[in-house]
Amino acid sequence: MPHFEHPTETVFTWAAPPLKFGLGALAETGQDLRALGVTNALVITDPGVAASDVPDRVAHAIKAAGLGCDIFDGVAVEPTDASIEEAVAFARAGDWDGYVAVGGGSAMDTAKAVNLLTTQPGTLMDYIAPPIGGGKVPELPVKPLIAVPTTAGTGSEATTICVVDLLDLRLKAGISHPRLRPALAVVDPLTTLSVPPAVTAASGMDVLTHAAESYTALAFDARPAFPDAAARAAFCGANPISDVWCEKAMELVGKHLRRAVMNGNDLSARYGMAYASAVTGMGFGNAGTHIPHANAYPIAGAVENYRAEGYPDMPMVPHGQAVASTAMAAFRFTYPADPQRHLRAAELIGGRPVDPDEGAEALPRVLRELQHDIGMPHGIAAFGYTESDLDTLVAGTMKQSRQLSVVPRPLTTDAAGRIFRESLRNW
């Protein structure tokens, strides 16, 4: 083998949980838990989802299978370190041997954190990715976790990722490790029928940016080689298997998201978006996201007064709105790294061929048209940010080592600043 002074990686990893998908899949949750060896399960959800009948239906299915079941409905939308500590304290007080997350990314990420911190030593910050946290690796077994998404958005049912809003730092950060991946994803499109239009739009844009970022991420074999298998990152970079799922997800979102926002009872559109969300998790959960997600964490963490339609009445930028807000400028920046992939992404989302002469503007144009049609905020100025906030946002972005490791071209602080500046208003 030839000797290289700085060898690149030659191996990628890909994994996903077993997936149960389809209308009515929710009714089999109790049987699924029994198959995993669970005898007493804790359902973890948030107050908004708890007000629907979905968690109660899950609990009924669990009890009908002869298993014990309780419900914790204290999950915070956009979970914080404080809200996760409350959920962990609740879980430590019981004798549950399995968990079921019911809800959007907030419920699933909280359940992952609960599973981690009730089975491993240490604190939440010990496991947060460096340089923000300690980057500790979980070494002990975790309990079976079934993820039941009720939005078509985060794809958290298929990933190793848990994202937390760190209140004192005014910054979001994440934990990622294969032990956090659910033991089973149960995706029932019927659970998404009651999701309001604005939440449908934001969740759908999260699906889309997941797919487009992973598809345009640094290729796995362009990364520096990891010293050994244990050191290999969960976000390994763009790879042939993730590409398949990301391409399918972009096609599905382009076809179904507008319809799902305009008519929430369009079951075909809801089915397509639920499918897109699940398969995107199989893509980005391995390849990894890059600049729009790195930007989204400080955008959400430093918000002061913005309140989003369809969400709890509190200052917050929903994750899907945060990632979408800088996506156009981010992909304009990454275009030179692989023009053909960016043009292909634009074709898949737009549903028609693009003129190669559009170059770096093709993908931003398609994203702008979609976001305008579904009523997304026009840019980060809509969240209350101005030129004077850009240094704070850039500093938060540059701490997101997990995302920055797969950016397809080097991101400097100046380049990050230009992306945020271009994203103050997108149309």
Image (cartoon, helix red, strand yellow):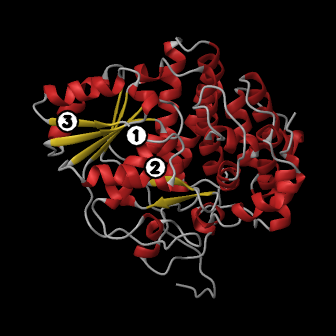
User: Which residue is drawn at the image coordinates 62% and 67% (left, top)?
Assistant: 401
Q: Quadrant of residue 217?
A: bottom right
| Residue 167 shown left or right of residue 159 in the figure | right
| Residue 254 shown left or right of residue 2 in the figure | right
Q: Is residue 374 above or below residue 36?
A: above
Q: Quadrant of residue 59?
A: top left
Q: Is residue 6 above or below residue 232?
A: below
Q: Is residue 145 above or below residue 68?
A: below
Secondary structure under badge 3? Answer: strand
Residue 116 lies, in percent from the top left, at 34, 59
Q: Tell me how far mark 3 sits from mark 1, CA to CA.
A: 16 Å
For label 1, the crowd category at 10 Å Cα-Cα, with few meaning under 14, some 14 to 19 and many 20 or more, is some
Q: Tell me how far mark 2 sits from mark 3, CA to CA.
A: 22 Å
Residue with the mark numbered 1: 74
Marks 1/2 in contact by CB < 8 Å: the verdict is yes
Residue with the mark numbered 3: 69
Residue 369 lies, in percent from the top left, at 79, 28
For label 3, the crowd category at 10 Å Cα-Cα, with few meaning under 14, some 14 to 19 and many 20 or more, is many
Residue 24 lies, in percent from the top left, at 32, 20
Secondary structure under badge 2? Answer: helix
